[in-house]
Amino acid sequence: MSSRPLPFREDCWSEQATWTLVDAWGRRYMELNRGNLRQKDWQQVSDSVNVLHGHSKKSRRTDVQCKNRIDTLKKKYKVEKAKIIESNGTLTSSWPFFERLDELIGNSDKKVTPVMVSPLPLPMSSPPMGVPLPYRRSAMVTPVSLPQKRQLPAFDESCFRRNYSAVAAAAAAGGGEEDYDDEEEEEDVEMTEESWEEDGMRRLAKAIERFGDIYERVEGMKQRQMVELEKQRMQFAKDLEVQRMQLFMDTQVQLEKIKHTKRSGSDDLYS
């Protein structure tokens, strides 16, 4: 049974770069207990990819490009998974990333299986031959409460997968619709990158302007302090000179008084 490949665009991602992306995202995804990655988490993922493959500006990836690439891989995984389920296990996926993604995002399906299967042996093994009706009722309460809640999601999920595989097949037959969506996603990514670059340039300009204002205020304060210190130095020198002149004048006055006293004494002596 042959099938032509689905129209998923690779967006110039090499297989090695995609493996690095899946490993970096998978580690962070498991660390968050299969929770959604935030912007800082995607930035760490893009840094891991760029360390190994971002040797040129064209090959460098942003956090938005990494997130879009993972979303594209998830879509491809769901289509491959639906094809395998529809074939009842007769088909296997040749897509190289299927097994790794099945370990990461396929475990949620595997967790449901033991819960549904484990209660089934209980009604077969526990009641013996000829057991009375009240005992059968108490034994049946245990498997009924758990499987009833679990079987509905499994049935709905299989229906969803069948519908999804049908939609995926229709999309593959339609052809260009997926390419058009990918082109719109690339345009959105480019617009987002441009807006981020413009926002970064504006923030850088504001930071430089703010630094210039602070530097100007600091320099002005230093100039004012130097002027004030020079004024204080000149005032101190002026006061010192005044005190020196005052001391000199006082000394001269005292000397004149002494001379005048000596002259008066000698005049009195000769008279």
Image (cartoon, rainbow, N blue to C red):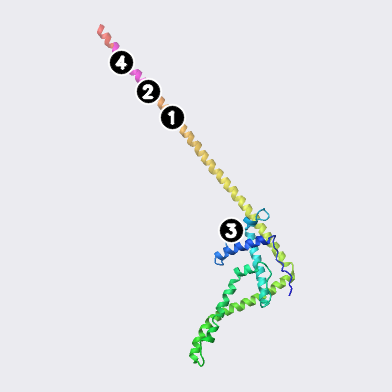
Q: Amino acid at mark 1?
A: Gln
Residue drawn at (40%, 25%), measured in percent from left and top?
Answer: 242
Residue underneath mark 1: 235
Q: Quadrant of residue 41?
A: bottom right
The residue wearing badge 4 is 258
Q: Position of residue 256 (x, y in %)?
A: 33, 15
Of the numbered discs 2 and 1, the one sitting upstream in the chain is 1
Q: Is residue 206 above or below residue 49?
A: above
In front of the other: 71 or 115: 115
Q: Kindly identify the amino acid type of the residue bearing the numbered disc 2.
A: Gln
Crowd class of label 3 (few under 14; some 14 to 19; many from 20; radius 10 Å): some
Distance of mark 1 from mark 3, alpha carbons? 63 Å
Residue numbers of the magenta segment: 243-263
Q: Position of residue 257 (x, y in %)?
A: 31, 16
Q: CA distance from mark 1 to mark 4?
A: 35 Å
> Helix or strand or loop: what does disc 4 sit on?
helix
Mark 1, other Cα within 10 Å: few <14 / some 14–19 / many ≥20:
few
Up-down relation of residue 211 to residue 186 (above or below): above
| Disc on res. 44 | 3
**Marks 4 and 3: in contact by CB < 8 Å?**
no
User: Helix or strand or loop: what does disc 1 sit on?
Assistant: helix
- Contact, mark 2 vs mark 3 (Cβ under 8 Å): no
Q: Which residue of the protein is positioned furthest toward the top in this rendering?
A: 270
- Count every numbered label the image shows and give the total: 4
> Which residue type does callout 4 highlight?
Ile
Identity, as a three-letter code, of the amino acid under mark 3: Gln
Q: Nearer the viewer, mark 3 or mark 4?
A: 3
The circle drawn on residue 246 is 2
